[in-house]
Image: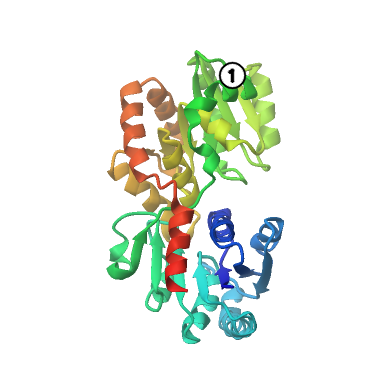
Amino acid sequence: MKRVIISGGGTGGHIYPAIAIANELKHQAPATEILFVGANNRMEMQKVPLAGYKIIGLDIAGIQRKLSLENLRFPIKLFKSLKNAREIIKEFRPDVCVGVGGYASAPTLLMASFMKIPTLIQEQNSYAGIANKVLARKAQKICVAYPQMDKYFPKGKIVFTGNPVRKDILELENKRATALQYFGLHENKKTLLIIGGSLGARTINLSIQKNLKRLIENDIQVIWQTGKHFYTTAQRSVADEKTSLIKVFEFINVMDLAYAAADVVISRAGALSISELCLAGKPCILVPSPNVAEDHQTKNAQVLVNNKAALMVADKHAEAFLVGDAIDLLYDELLQKELQRNIKRFAKPNAAQEIVREIMQIW
């Protein structure tokens, strides 16, 4: 029986790929024992147990980008986390440690490398953070989601696997009729899907709210996922317009149907969102969040833009240009087809299987 530690988290972009890897490990090698190591008070401490896996938390947090007293505590927390990671590894005795990014992955993989345990990094973004660059020196394998990552990592260790995402977004064409019926949409109207992540994206939401009349005047129907903070505001704005074209949701649980109904998608540019858009093969306009480490969402989006696989609107320009660009794209079928064709080239539907294969090669 093999034992595997999977470490990291902090956001859905780290946690859901980690759970997908764990699920695939159990599928390919059912006897495998899996332990997650996360950061206390982060979302992995709730999400991982719900997926059926044990998790232990480290008392670790990142360095704040602005001056903060928390930064003075960072060295103490790091030292304590390294000590705790050593105790966890010593007790669990893993055959391999997998890091998926997030606060906990650095101390766990650093200690695993020090203890001569094979390590594998799964880098979701097109831009590698400082921690993964350091961890890469000792890692046996580095699974990446974008080409040309040898500018950050040793070329001989890199495997282009893509990011593990939900499988239900494949074969969307067969779901379109069901999707339109589910959302109460018309078959002969253009459909725009707006997703800003599970918590929503304030800039995207404000851009849509201020331009509802333009969307209605252009006979465009909208599936609008607002997140919990903007949901009531969006509902009121749509009610004021007395329209049935705009469907407002706090959160969408059936993303496969949302993608199937959509002609064009507006989205943030997180790694998981982009991987889903590539698999769905949807023409999209990306609005990278400026509030992320090292502006990695812009770098993610730029890879697709450079390959004519997506359009991009900067967050600071969204209120002025986003809805106009979306309307133009919805009525430009030639551009839609070009973006669709090119974004599909980035799709990696078997990412979880390929990552597990790499894990099995080093344990």
Q: Is residue 118 left or right of residue 244?
A: left
Residue at point 53%, 59% (across, down): 28
Q: Measured from the top left, where is residue 84 in percent x and y?
A: 63, 83
Q: Secondary structure at mark 1?
A: loop
Give the amino acid type for the residue marked by disc 1 in the picture: Leu
* Total tally of numbered discs in the picture: 1
Q: Is residue 131 visible?
A: no
**In the depicted view, which residue is nearer to us: 327 or 283?**
283
Image spot of residue 173 (x, y percent) = 48, 27
As drawn, is 317 to the left or to the right of 168?
A: left
What residue is drawn where x is 59% and y is 23%? 178
Measuring 45% from the left and 60% from the top, which residue is drawn there? 355
Question: Would residue 230 appear left or right of 348 to someone viewing this image?
Answer: right
Instruction: Look at the image and tell me whether residue 297 can be seen.
Output: yes
Would you call the spot at circle 1 few (<14 residues within 10 Å), some (14-19), or many (20 or more)? Answer: many
Q: Nearer the viewer, residue 297 or 159?
A: 159
Identify whether 146 is placed above or below 122. above
- Viewer-side residue, 275 vs 168: 168
Q: Is residue 155 above or below residue 194?
A: below
Q: Position of residue 356 (x, y in %)?
A: 48, 61
Residue 233: image quadrant is top right
Q: Which residue is mark 1?
A: 185
Q: Residue at x 49, y 57 (%)?
A: 292
93 or 283, nearer to the observer: 93
Q: Quarter holding the N terminus?
A: bottom right
Q: Residue furthest top?
A: 188
Which percent across, then down, holds residue 63?
53, 71
